[in-house]
Structures are given as structure tokens and as C-alpha cells.
Amino acid sequence: MKVGRVAQHWARNCLAVGLSQGFIEPLEATALHLVQETVENFIEAYTAGGFSLQHQDAFNAAVNARFEGIRDYIVCHYKVNSRNDTAYWRDNAANTALSDSLKQVLQVWHDGQDLVPELQRQGIERYYAAASWHCLLGGYGQYPPPQRLIPPSAKAARYDMARIRDFVQRCALNFPPHDQALREIRVA
């Protein structure tokens, strides 16, 4: 199966949407997202400039960037997988044909640096936020060597704990207290 995208999603009076514009992987949510974004961006670009080449070029560049950002996140799943039961998974883990963008994200992660500035520098945090990359890489057991980890400052650690505590307390407002919930379970 050949995956990829067209270079120009909008050329003259033709707009490629869905499978006519590209294919990354058989995940329907990703395909639907790309269709929705393409249509919304087209309406915005066309409304702003009609059929002008300037607006077509800007539109095509934006859609291509979105495809590439999504592609890197999907490819990363295959690259960092830990399966070795078939040649398919071993080959994907051994794949060295990665985009420069993905190579840089992985380098930053394995160096124990903060992903947020790198994702922002590349402009790909709008496709998958740092939390998604953290879950992906951590979920696959990809961690920097301990000697490369940089502990947070005491201030940052307190700030994060305060945010977490606040979040948990707000979530708890949606549920009865623990002892009350246990009593209700025993009665039922």
C-alpha cells in the first residue's frame, strides 16, 4: 500500500479532499480530521482571496504541514514499538527513514530535554500537543538514560503539584465522598 499526499491540494479550480489528497494510515479519525481541516481551511482561504495563487499556495503549505505533523506522530508509533513477533514490527522499529522533524523530536526526548520548545519551534504542537508525545513515548517505554534527566526546579515541582491538586479537587466535585460511595455500594 502506498501512503503519502499530493503536493497541491488546491490547484486552480480543483480541490483534493479525503483519499484523493492523501493517505497516512487506516485510522478513520485521522482521515476525518484531515477532511474537516481541509474543508475549513479552504473556505477560509477562498473567502479571503478567491482563486489567487497567493492564497492557494498558503493553503497548500498549511495542509501539507498538517499531513507531515500527523505523519510523524503516526510513524513514531511504529518506530518505537516494542513488538518483535514478526518481521513487520522488527522492520518498523529498525526504520531509519524518518523525517528530519521526527528525528529531532526523538533526539530532544532521548537527550532528556523539554519537548515543548521543540514542538513549538517546528510548529507541530498544534497537531499533537506535548502531552500526546509524552504519552506516546512514555507509553512505549522510551525514556532517556537517567544521567540525562533534568529534575524540575523546586518552584516548577510545586507549581505542577498545585495544578494537579486543583484539578483533582475540581474533578472530585462531580462525585460523592469516598466513604459515602462505599456505603452506597454496600447497601446496593
Image (spheres, rainbow, N blue to C red):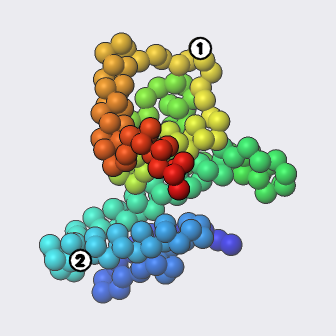
Q: Residues within 10 Å of mark 1 (few under 14, many from 20)?
A: few
Q: Percent from the top left, x then y, of residue 70?
A: 48, 57
**Quarter of the image with the N terminus in it:** bottom right
Q: Percent from the top left, x then y, of residue 71?
A: 52, 57
Q: Is residue 96 above or below residue 13?
A: above
Which residue is drawn at the image coordinates 36% and 82% (left, top)? 15
Q: As shown in the figure, which amino acid type bears the numbered disc 1?
A: Gln
Q: Is residue 129 left or right of residue 144?
A: left
Q: As shown in the figure, which amino acid type bears the numbered disc 2?
A: Ile
Q: Can the viewer see residue 117?
A: no
Q: Classify residue 173 by image quadrant.
A: top left
Q: Is residue 163 above or below residue 97?
A: above
Q: Percent from the top left, x then y, of residue 42?
A: 28, 75
Q: Percent from the top left, x then y, of residue 17?
A: 42, 79
| Secondary structure category for the residue under label 1 | helix
Which residue is drawn at the image coordinates 50% and 31% (left, top)? 108
Q: Can the viewer see residue 143?
A: yes
Q: Which residue is outermost to the front? A: 187
Which mark, by number, is residue 147? 1
Which residue is drawn at the image coordinates 44% and 39% (left, top)? 178
Q: Residues within 10 Å of mark 2 (few under 14, many from 20)?
A: few
Determine which residue is flagged by label 2: 43
**Badge 1 or badge 2: first in the primary sequence:** 2
Number of marks present in the image shown = 2
Nearest the eye: 162 or 88: 162
